[in-house]
Amino acid sequence: MKRTDYITWDEYFMGVAKLSGMRSKDPSTQVGACIVSQDNKILSMGYNGFPIGCSDDEFPWDKKGEEEDTKYPYVTHSELNAILNYRGGSLAGAKLYVSLFPCNECAKAIIQSGIREIIYECDKYADTPAVRASKRMLDAAGVSYRQYESAGRNVTIEL
C-alpha cells in the first residue's frame, strides 16, 4: 500500500516558497515566491533582495530614516524576482505561491505576466494602501487569490 501521509501540492509549493525566502538577507522580512504551471511543475522561484550587481553589504537594510537610506527603494520583491527569473516564455495560467500577500507594484507584474492565481500565507499589511490597491487591481483583472490553509504539519529538513 502507498503512504497516506505525503504532503499536498499546496504544502509542497508553499514549502518551496518559504525555503526560497530563507535566502533573503533582509534582517526583518524574508519573503519567498514559487511560480507553478497548471500541471504542477515549478517554473521559477524568487526571494526579496537587491538586484544583481548591487551588493547587500553596500546598500541599506534599514526600515526607517530618509528614503534613500532605507531598503525600500532598492529591494526587489520575491514575486517580481520569480517573474524576472523565469526564462521559459509565457507564465499565462500559472499559479504563484508567496509567503506574504503581494504589494501593488508586484500585483502589476503578476497581472501583466499572465499569472491567474495567488496562494499566499500571510496578509499582515491588508489594511495598507498598497495592498488595498493590489487587491483592487487583481480583482479587476480576474486574478484569484486565496490564503494558504496550513495543515499544522511540521516538516523538518536537515541540511
Image (cartoon, rainbow, N blue to C red):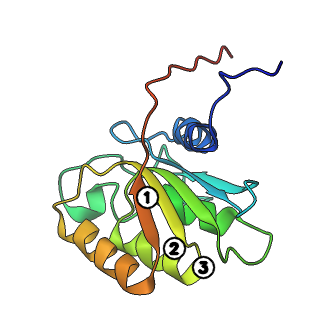
* Kind of element beneath mark 2: helix
Q: Residue furthest right?
A: 1
Asked whether the beta carbons under mark 3 and mark 1 sit within 8 Å of each other, the answer is: no
Q: Amino acid at mark 2?
A: Ile
- Using residue 52 as the reference point, say whether residue 149 is left or right of it: left
Q: Which residue is denoted by mark 2 in the rendering? A: 110
Give the residue number, with chain letter if any, for mark 1. Answer: 75
The picture places residue 151, in percent across and down from the top left corner, at 46, 30
Q: For the residues carrying marks 2 and 1, which lies nearer the camera in this image?
A: 2
Q: Which mark is first along the chain, 1 or 3?
A: 1
- Real-space Cα distance between discs 2 and 1? 17 Å
CA separation in Å, label 3 and label 2: 7 Å
> Which residue is at a point 49% across and 22% down the rendered structure image?
153
* Image quarter of residue 114: bottom right
Q: Residues within 10 Å of mark 2 (few under 14, many from 20)?
A: many
Q: Which residue is mark 3?
A: 114
Q: Position of residue 1 (x, y in %)?
A: 83, 18
**Rendered residue at 48%/43% (across/down):** 57
Dots 3 and 2: beta carbons under 8 Å?
A: no
Label 3 element class = loop
Mark 1 residue type: Val
Disc 3/disc 1 C-alpha distance (Å) = 23 Å
Residue 114 vertical position relative to residue 150 in the rendered view, above or below: below
